[in-house]
Amino acid sequence: MSEPQSGFPFEPGTELMADRARSREAVEVCLESLRTGALPDSAERQRVDFKEEAGRRGVAGSLLPGVSENTKAADQLADEVSAMANTPGGGALIVGVEDRSGDLLGTDLNIEWLRQQIYRRVEVAPEIEEHIEQGIRLLVIYAAEAREPVDDTSGRIRWRVGAASAPVDRGEWWARRQDRSGWDSMARPTSFTIDSVRPEAIAVARDYLARRDTSNDTQADLAAAAPTDMLRRIGVLSVDGYLTEAGALLFCPAPRAWLTWTRLDVEGGDILAYDSEYEGLSLLEQIERVEALLDAANDRITLPGEFSERAIRQLPSRSAREAVLNGVVHRDWNLQEPTTATWVEADASLTVVSPGGFVGGISADNVLTQRYSRYPALADVSRALGLVDKQGVGVDRMYREMVSIGHRPPLLVEEPGPRVRVRLAGGQPLLPIIRLTSKIQPAARQRDVQIALIVHTLLRSPFTTVQRMSKILQRTVDEAAEALEIAHRCVIDGQPLISPLKNVWTLSKEARHIVGGQAADRKMLQRQRVLWFMAPGAEEASEIVSQWFEVQDRITSGDYSKLTGMTPAGARGALDRFVQEGRLVRGDAAGRNAHYLPRGNATILQPETPQENGS
């Protein structure tokens, strides 16, 4: 047993804090060396690296003026942050220093912009601090040790070796991880070797790898590699020939079914198909079989000519697949019951129940923003095989793909057991909503889960607020306000997607027309409570005004007109009827300032309203 290191008294959970303290100390040592005109030695540079900001050199190597946003520098620093994050103990980058000479060049990069750009590229959000050294502005980027391998922007895994970064394969990365606290059991070596691997599992792995959409030359031949080489490169076979627990789980025969499939006619009805005879198959084979059954059950629907005869599934395929795979990869493997997948024919719905509750601070209220793997090694090899996407991206995609074609958002619930239940309800897509979402510009915003959820909310509510969207988007109030501003800058047919109204937001007149402008669509939309507030009847009018007074103290005919699409005269008449019924009173102003107030403390009739997320 090693002696405890001085200066760092042990407490559970303080390892990362101790690593950060060591990095800060190393940064100060390196800066002190520069002050004396000397370069730090290679031992000091293991944890700290100097980086001149990329893109700052002009003709004959002249130093160009600095800028606050520099994408070349963001690309360069994202790769270096990934290497530091892969290195045991993490480390730091000092930006604005010439690497070979140690000359201070400085940098004008904006800290918040740089942090976001690095996160966007390698999904690491480092701590960044400004340092003024000899009157020159430097940035120090601190990267904590990652729980899983971090690919750089070229799909490589690198870490620090002395004063430079060097490539490392997944197997070596996990072997090193075992020597540090906090590693997970799925990385532990077993007594199983390549001889224990089912050839059928290798064939399934080759199939998944061949489907991967990648231009990375280092992985292009992985699907055709020899089994030993393949397993070593995806990080499940050690140099001495033993499979990790993740490798044995995925590639060796299972003692029981880890997955089951049930197909019902209606909820709680007759069983049309049941498949659970998976004993002896590897987990990879079980996953492939359930995926095939799901594919056969999930019928295609051909959209009309305006969508170029496009065919889509009743349930978005990637959403359904993500639900199943998340239920396998992130389940509690200390429990022996299977992950269950149930398809209901009448609803085109999929319910996946996985053993074990939420962990790592994840809950149903933050799945869009929080990231955590119960078993990082299993999650990593699943990504290496192309089974799942980068951590957390699949959940975002589930939400976006569901609401963008008119379905409800996914339902995620933690139940007694504990276990997590995920339900996706599909069926006939709503063509008017597809018509709207396919028109959003810039086109990249059609893939933005926040824009999709804002549109979904405003199709089912006359308006929304920053506070309401904060809950739906699972982000802070400031972040929700920013998302609404971004949605406002999006256009459809040259017009804004959403519009401000006092301190709330509404779907724009143009967007509402695209969805509800065709008479043939209106009855179907009303059944789904889409745009129910347009030209409302008496019951809907009460609901609209009730919701308005939850966030405003008065209402004008102009407000009501914009909420409902009615003419100003029609809106005034609707509000006057509330006055006649004794539920509103006219304010004491006239003309443009004319308005209506609730009568006393009496509440307006409030019919039961659906949940804000449409569930």
Image: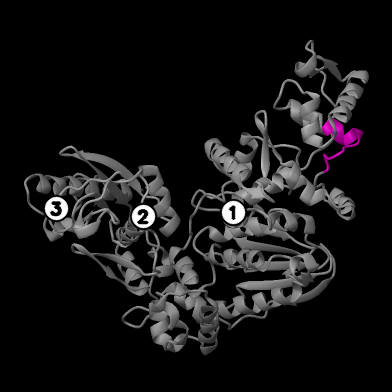
SS assignment at label 1 = loop
Colouring chosen for the image of the structure: one colour
Q: Give the image location of residue 379, x and y in percent.
A: 48, 66
| Cα distance between the residues tagged 2 and 3 | 21 Å
Q: Quadrant of the N terminus?
A: bottom left
Lower position in the chain sequence, tag 2 or tag 1: 2
Q: Give 502 or 530, whichever is nearer the viewer.
A: 502
Residue 209 painted magenta: no
SS assignment at label 3 = loop
Q: Residues within 10 Å of mark 2 (few under 14, many from 20)?
A: many
Q: Which residue is mark 2?
A: 74
- Residue 550 relative to residue 99: left or right: right
Can you name the residue that lies furthest to the top here?
Answer: 588
Lower position in the chain sequence, tag 2 or tag 3: 2
Q: Give the image location of residue 43, x and y in percent.
A: 14, 59
Q: Give the image location of residue 305, x and y in percent.
A: 79, 68
Marks 2/3 in contact by CB < 8 Å: the verdict is no
Q: Residues within 10 Å of mark 1 (few under 14, many from 20)?
A: few
Residue 239 can be seen, yes or no? yes
Residue 12 can be seen, yes or no? no
| Cα distance between the residues tagged 2 and 1 | 23 Å
Residue 534 painted magenta: yes
Mark 1 is on which residue type? Answer: Pro
Lower position in the chain sequence, tag 1 or tag 3: 3
Mark 3 is on which residue type? Answer: Gly
Instruction: In the rendered structure, find residue 442 and report the number of the disc placed on it.
Output: 1
Q: Which residue is mark 3?
A: 102
- Residue 196 relative to residue 468: left or right: left
Q: Which residues are magenta?
A: 532-543
Q: Give 412 or 394, whichever is nearer the viewer.
A: 394
Mark 2 is on which residue type? Answer: Ala
